[in-house]
Image (cartoon, helix red, strand yellow):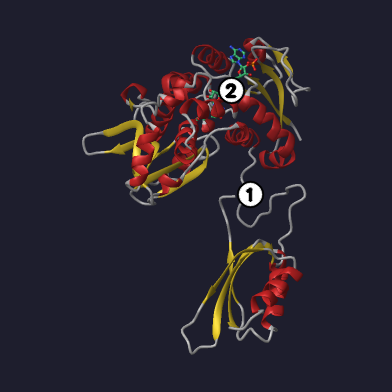
Amino acid sequence: MNELKLGLLGLGTVGGGVLTLLERNGDAIANRAGLRIRVVAAAVRDAAKARPGAEDVRLTTSIDEVIDDPDVDVVLELMGGTDAAKTAVERAIRAGKPVVTANKALIALHGQTLFEQAKAQGTTVSYEAAVAGGIPLIKALREGLTANKIHSIAGIINGTCNYILTEMSQTGAAFDTVLADAQRLGYAEADPTFDVGGIDAAHKLTILASIAFGIPLSFDQVTTDGIGSVTAEDLTYARELGYRIKPLAIARRQSKGVELRVHPTLVPEKDLLANVNGVLNAVVVRADAASPTGYFGPGAGAEATASAVLADVVDLARNSTGVKMPALGQSEALPNPPRPLSIDDAVSAHYLRLRVADTPGVLNAISGALAEHAISIEAIVQKELPSPVSTTTVIILTQPVPERVAAAACAQIEALSAVSDTVHRIRVEHFDE
Ligand code: NAP
Ligand code: HSE
């Protein structure tokens, strides 16, 4: 199998994530792409810094050296900023090399120029990772929703701001403390005022609106209001009124034109977006056919963003090899594919409803049967029935166990003389953990 060799401009949070994913999932990615993908060179500011996992990568402080390296097939711009990054991407385009970038500022401000240059050179600039981190939102808009007329896009597209407001609201932590955490976790921009000032979200909204509405990239038309003015008091009062304050970006079509705005917003607490917390992003797209559709996931972070970067790289690899996504029904030759399990091996928690005699010791007998099968009880409730009924209802929530264990325990409970009916069992799943 041939190789597709990557040259990275920047080996920080996102570049490091690319190395990690290629190391962990390289075999599967190679199968899907039709080519093995390997990072051969990277430009950094400090070549002496320890970079675990980059032992086989040629490190240099020269951006040009990476771009001009005859070994490099694709240039990944993962350093950020707009000056050196623009110069570098233009150089890569002139060299006829495809560029993949995570840099929303670059695309929002200079995308038009770069796309035209790339077209003239017969190459491409891809930017899935520039918006909403690991969520494949650009693909969804450009491919999945291609038959729709988009009415609006609204969502949380800055992980740092959502993380800050969530932590302030839920733990009472101070703004500066939480911002420092977001920086330590690799979520924030090199200049975090881009995050808290709403500029980063405005860059992303510029890109989304351009794709959705077919308008030029219009960063200077986005009204931008940061989260700096939101106080702990505002978060409390909003909560008392049944709302949450969320950092929203909104692009909405009107008869007169398109609204483009980024600002903190009160969202009713039952709304989907009100319940998207931490670094998570979520975007709701309203359109004329498939509507609404929602996209949810990690908006920042090393591996989440690298996932989007590598999706673009795999597209390039497929274009160069002609390897297509396998059609439904054609199996993909993945290494060590998992086998489908019997339901007996499925693991979930359980809600159990039992009808039992209202006699002393019955709860002990039931919990004893569960303990024999090593099933822990999460909660137990006894519901008295009106007299003269001599039975009572017991509700139990268990911890997750394999299906066969839950079934065996229920059979044992049903055999108890104090239990007057079959055990009514419903599976419980926790999807936020
Ligand atoms: P980062 O951790 O600060 O890494 C930047 C990397 O670029 C570092 O390796 C740095 O070298 C190198 N670099 C910067 N300027 C350079 C120059 N002039 N010459 C050579 N190397 C240079 O940044 P990041 O978080 O990975 O973000 C990179 C890009 O991805 C940005 O455009 C950002 O907006 C975007 N992005 C980030 C995330 C995220 O969650 N972090 C998510 C989506 C998109 P040193 O290591 O020597 O300092
Ligand atoms: N600083 C950005 C954020 C990184 O917090 O959303 C992802 O684009």
Find the residue positioned furthest to the left.
256
- Find the distance from the CA under tag 2 to the CA under tag 1: 30 Å
Q: Return the residue nearer the eye: 159 or 351.
A: 351
Relative horizontal placement of residue 384, taking residue 233 as reference (left or right): right
Q: Is residue 332 above or below residue 79?
A: below
Task: Give the numbered dot on residue 334.
Answer: none
Image coords of residue 398 (percent x, y): 63, 65
Quadrant where the N terminus sits is top right
The mark nearer the N terminus, 2 or 1, is: 2
Determine the secondary structure under disc 1. Answer: loop
Q: Return the residue nearer the eye: 251 or 423.
A: 423
Quadrant in which residue 237 is drawn: top left
Q: Is residue 216 above or below residue 86?
A: below
- Tag 2–tag 1 contact (CB < 8 Å): no
* Residue marked by disc 2: 78
Q: Is residue 229 visible?
A: yes
Q: Return the residue nearer the eye: 309 or 378.
A: 378
Quadrant in which residue 252 is drawn: top left
Relative horizontal placement of residue 58, taking residue 193 as reference (left or right): right
* Residue marked by disc 1: 326
Q: Is residue 152 visible?
A: no
Quadrant in which residue 274 is drawn: top left
Label 1 beta carbon less than 8 Å to ligand 1: no
Q: Residues within 10 Å of mark 2 (few under 14, many from 20)?
A: many
Image coords of residue 115 (percent x, y): 46, 23
Relative horizontal placement of residue 157, taking residue 370 as reference (left or right): left
Q: Is residue 161 above or below residue 190?
A: below
Please report the residue visible at 46 percent of the width from the left and 35 percent of the height from the top. Answer: 168
Label 2 beta carbon less than 8 Å to ligand 1: yes
Disc 2 residue type (three-letter): Leu
Image coords of residue 145 (percent x, y): 43, 45
Please report the residue visible at 58 percent of the width from the left and 27 percent of the height from the top. Answer: 186
